[in-house]
Image (cartoon, rainbow, N blue to C red):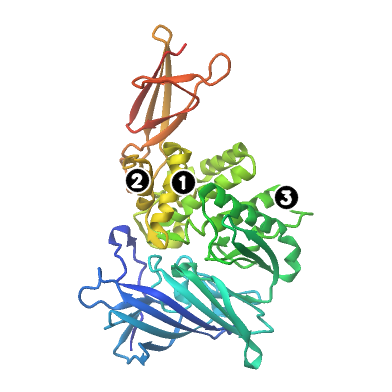
Amino acid sequence: MSDIRSEKKPQAIYLKDYRPPDYRVETVNLQFDLDESRTKVKSLLTVVCNHDRCEGIHPFVLQGRDLKLLDVKLDGQPLSEHDYRIEGETLSIIPVPDRFVLEIETECDPAANTELSGLYRSGSMFCTQCEAEGFRKITYYPDRPDVLAKFMTTIVADKKKYPVLLSNGNLIGSGDLQDGRHFAKWHDPFPKPAYLFALVAGDLARIEDRFTTLSGREVTLHIYVQHHNRDKCGHAMDSLKKAMKWDEETYGREYDLDLFMIVATDDFNMGAMENKGLNIFNSKYVLADERTATDSDFQGIMGVVGHEYFHNWSGDRVTCRDWFQLSLKEGFTVFRDQQFMEDMMSRGVERIGDANLLRTHQFREDAGPMAHPVRPESYVEINNFYTMTVYNKGAEVIRMMRTLLGPEGFRNGADLYFSRHDGQAVTTDDFVKAMEDATGTDLVQFRLWYTQAGTPELTVTRRYDPLEKTYTVMIRQSCPATPGQPVKKPFHIPVALGLLGKDGKDAHLHLMGEKHAAAGTRVLHVRREEERFTFINMR
């Protein structure tokens, strides 16, 4: 074994340098022997060469951090010190056959993991957070979102301290072992990237309910909390069932496992996380005491529970190819949870609140020294890109697409996106392409919303000609310079416009050049720096 460790300055990572993985991981079999300071993890990976990439000799490269490597075997044979190389956070194995089984045993220290990334202690329980790059603190693995595999997880722990053992998927086995220990075995049949892996072990109370899907399947719903909080989960459970029903009715997305679980913990640094089948939340987004909680508390819980559940399709079943595509899952899912809250609460009030949040926070971000596109071109630390731009501006980009395509066209595009890319790791371009293909709409210029930073400004002037009976609207767009982008191309901006007649009702709008007039709001397409729209027969 060669072990080279050196302190390096953080290096920028660029979208243009993306390359598909040289190897695919088909299955992952994990075995955890939990201990507060010396947890042992055995991983069994079934790996296949990606023949589109594996011309010549390519090492199989895995990432790991703060791990003690105990053993490495290739197809059952122990590897010698000459067969692998550790350099910084990478473990490289060469040569390897086209198809092989790699067994790795490591040890980690959850109690010393104060980053709360990977496997760590949360009070008296074990918990994980693997997005974006936390899985590498659990075991060596190709820790990138475009490596999708089916996971089998066995957890062994002290039964008295940790009577509840949870992981992704469906529980397929459990039982007692010697020395007061027990085990639970979980299987997730859906391929997922490592960032969606989750494990929880502790002494927790469980609240249970059922949900019957549109196709008639019964899904078991569990919420796990500390025992003294078990009476504060009713609203979260109701919110979950409403979200499941709404996603079926609005997007045709049905839940796919037999079990859906939520765990609430006080020490969780991400707010909430959409791990497949096992969402982990900070307690503030689950617990509500009806005697003391405010309306905004209840509303916040409903929104976050919905958001993380909606990720089951927009993030889990279809995930992002690389972290530059973060808005693919987050922008889309924020938009979906905004739609959900509009339907559950007051559409107008919710929209005003979302717009105020954007104006107050995201506009400032877009106008400052840290302005960046919804899909950035580079980053040094990916955790710094969980921003209002990626999330909330990304949601507004999706909303504009829906405005351009109409509700039916957008739904058709979403259906195509989910069916075309189920089980894949894709890009924002793939999302837009699905919208184009489903509706026959050209969205080439619209893609600039993903690549250009800044908040465009519209100047609107109007003129009515009483002699010609025309009403002309002139719209001019501009966008201030942002770091690295001094000059901006015109965006494709949908502008919804309507006029009221003397009777206070919607006027019929007949745009010059069109054959017929139409009542109600019209969507105008602003594509150039200045556009002119003239409506005729305006009396």
Q: At 57% from the left edge and 61% from the top edge, which residue is drawn?
A: 272
| Residue 65 visible in rendering | no
Compared with 233, 25 (above or below) is below
Q: Return the x and y of residue 366 as percentages of the image width and height.
A: 44, 45
Q: Nearer the viewer, mark 3 or mark 2?
A: 2
Q: Name the amino acid type tagged 3.
A: Thr
Look at 69% across and 60% down and name the residue there.
287
Q: Which residue is mark 3?
A: 294
347, above or below 214, in the image? above
Gap between marks 3 and 1, in whole Å?
28 Å
Q: Where in the figure is residue 187, as x and y percent of width and height?
A: 52, 74
Whole-number angstrom distance, CA of label 2 to CA of label 1: 24 Å
Q: Where, quadrant-wise, is the N terminus in this rendering?
A: bottom left
Mark closer to the chain start, 3 or 1:
3
Name the amino acid type tagged 1. Lys
Indicate the secondary structure of the residue bearing disc 3: loop
Residue drawn 31% across the image and 42% down it: 444
Question: Are the residues at dot 3 and dot 2 in contact (C-beta closer than 8 Å)?
Answer: no
Q: Earlier in the sequence, mark 2 or mark 1?
A: 1
The front one of 267 and 343 is 343
Comes first in the chain, label 3 or label 2: 3
Residue type at mark 2 is Asp
Query: Horizontal and vertical percent for residue 404?
Result: 42, 37
Q: Which mark is residue 437?
A: 2
**Residue that badge 1 annotates:** 393
- Mark 3 to mark 2 CA distance (whole Å): 45 Å
